[in-house]
Amino acid sequence: MHKPAPESRESITYLPDKLFYRIGEACKIVGVKPHILRYWETEFPFLKPRKNKSGQRVYVKRDIEFLLRVRRLLYQDRYTIEGVKKKLSGISIRSDNSDVRTGETQNLSEVISHVKKSLKLILTRLK
């Protein structure tokens, strides 16, 4: 079994309260170079930052929190990329008392179906 590295003061990161973070800002917060973030996007399918009109990646707070978790698992807990994928395969996004799983097990049509059911429920309650 591996022994996790001790958590240092530098690992506790201040996250500015913003709607969007450019890749440079995300790199400073997470503590990695831009090519590392771009590589992680290819390895973790649930990490898909939006792009602004000029095509630059923009991350939301949830993305930054995920990146910080990945960095901790890789660099402090010494997981491999495959180990991080397994550990994070059950990540869920909580929204309005619903649980929508991300990753390969759920496709877009299932998400749309869930949203339709939720909207129909709201519509019946409004009548």
Image (cartoon, rainbow, N blue to C red):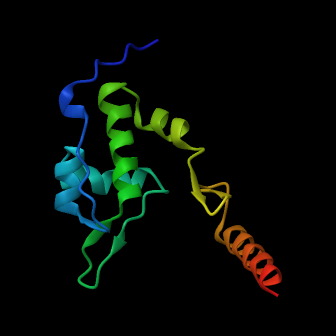
Residue drawn 49% across the image and 56% down it: 46
Q: Where is residue 62 shown, x and y percent of the image?
A: 41, 56
**Which sits in the foreground, 30 or 95?**
95
Residue drawn 25% across the image and 35% down it: 12
On screen, 123 above or below 27? below
On screen, 89 above or below 73? below
Question: Number of marks in the image?
Answer: 0
**Which sits in the foreground, 116 or 34?**
116
Side of 127 where 27 appears, left or right: left
Residue drawn 80% across the image and 79% down it: 125
Side of 127 where 25 appears, left or right: left
Q: Where is residue 14 shown, x and y percent of the image?
A: 23, 45
On screen, 41 above or below 69? below
Residue drawn 50% across the image and 41% down it: 85
Query: In which quadrant of the rendered image does the C terminus lie?
Result: bottom right
Side of 63 where 91 appears, left or right: right
Q: Where is residue 29 shown, x and y percent of the image?
A: 21, 49
Could you say which quadrant of the image residue 120 lies in? bottom right
Could you say which quadrant of the image residue 98 lies in? bottom right
Q: Where is residue 121 shown, x and y percent of the image?
A: 79, 76
On screen, 17 above or below 112? above
Side of 113 where 28 appears, left or right: left
The outermost residue toward the bottom is: 127
